Image (cartoon, helix red, strand yellow):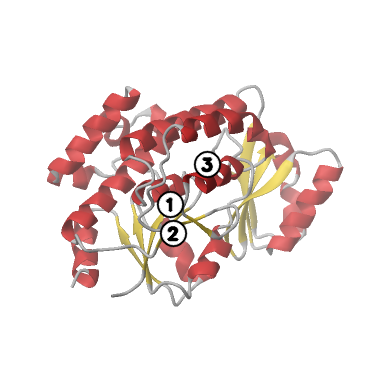
Amino acid sequence: MKKIAMIFAGQGSQATGMGRDFYDNSELAKEMFDKAGERIGINFEELIFGEHELLNQTAYTQPAILLVQMIAYRLLKEECPDLKAELFLGHSLGEFSALCASGAIDYIDAIELVHRRGQLMQDACTDIEAGMMVVMGLDDEAVEKICTAAQQDGKKVWPANYNQDGQLVVAGMRADLASLEQTFKDAGAKRALLLNMSVASHCELLSAAQIPLKSLMEGMIEDSFEAPVVSNVTTTLYATKKEAVELLTKQLVEPVKYKQSILAIENSVDIAIEFGNGATLKGLNKRIAPNLETYNVSDMKSLAEVAAQICN
């Protein structure tokens, strides 16, 4: 039996219409949509399948992504009842999906948790002009050096997402980020682009959200891991409630080390399966660890293809 990493993308992977194929062809998917909607008081069919302005608001983006990811995961488990993960891994929000898939939190509780997490993140950035910027074509050390120099000048900017070589997302005050665009380009960046986001994820600007998020997690996460989860903060495995609460509290203000996490696990697993809309992580994995074969389950067709590949 091949050793499998189950992986989950984060915010930015959402799209109008995601999960529609699951919804139209699976009673389980319909049931999960309904129960998730009841928990947080939102009609997920309207939110995801129509042109709904709330889909790109963090408090609703996060549960929508997690819902579609968990439907994809549950449907593959139905097709392959004996399928076991060696480990679970997610990118930012995706770490909560990983935790859910591991069995450490019920998906309905996870829907509420990430909804509340999104609200806390939005609240922390309400009275400030926060944002994020993707920097392409510079190595990590160059970006870190520019951020450190900017901090010494009183600017609030931090490395936030280590996605792959030559792609690092920086978070902070929007004006401070904008002021560094030319600095990054002068240092050799091919692009330095402000993203359409009103929160600054994985940096100190979210410190006010840490205590309330920790309290929420204490009441929802359980010591019932089917397999360990890779921490975005440390790139190491954890499999206890205590570690999950501590590390996911830190994750709010610490950078996501996705690239480093894939490099840390590539020799421990044979394949990775990405669940949910698109194939964001599949693309990153191809560039980070070309020998790590990655599949994605995003609709009924890809579900059948993956099941045929790995269930026999």
Direction from residue 298 to residue 123 in the image, left or right: right
Across and down, in percent, residue 147 comes to 76, 49
Q: Which residue bears the numbered disc 2?
A: 281
Pick the quarter of the image with the N terminus.
bottom left
Alpha-carbon span between mark 1 and mark 3: 20 Å
- Kind of residue sitting beneath label 3: Val
- Kind of residue sitting beneath label 1: Ala
Q: Are marks 2 and 1 in contact (CB under 8 Å)?
A: yes
Mark with earlier residue (2, 1): 1
Q: Which mark is residue 245?
A: 3
Mark with earlier residue (2, 3): 3
Residue at the image position 26 percent from the left and 44 percent from the top = 19
Residue 210's place in the image compared with 243, above or below, is above
Q: Which residue bears the numbered disc 1?
A: 9
Instruction: Tell me which corner region of the image, top left, top right, bottom left or bottom right, holds residue 222.
Output: top left
Across and down, in percent, residue 8 comes to 40, 53
| Residue 10 at least partly seen | no
Label 1: few (<14), some (14–19) or many (≥20) C-alpha neighbours in 10 Å:
many
Direction from residue 30 to residue 147 in the image, left or right: right
Q: Secondary structure at mark 3?
A: helix
Residue 295's place in the image compared with 225, above or below, is below
Q: Secondary structure at mark 1?
A: loop
Mark with earlier residue (1, 3): 1
As rendered, which of 216 and 98 lies closer to the eye? 216
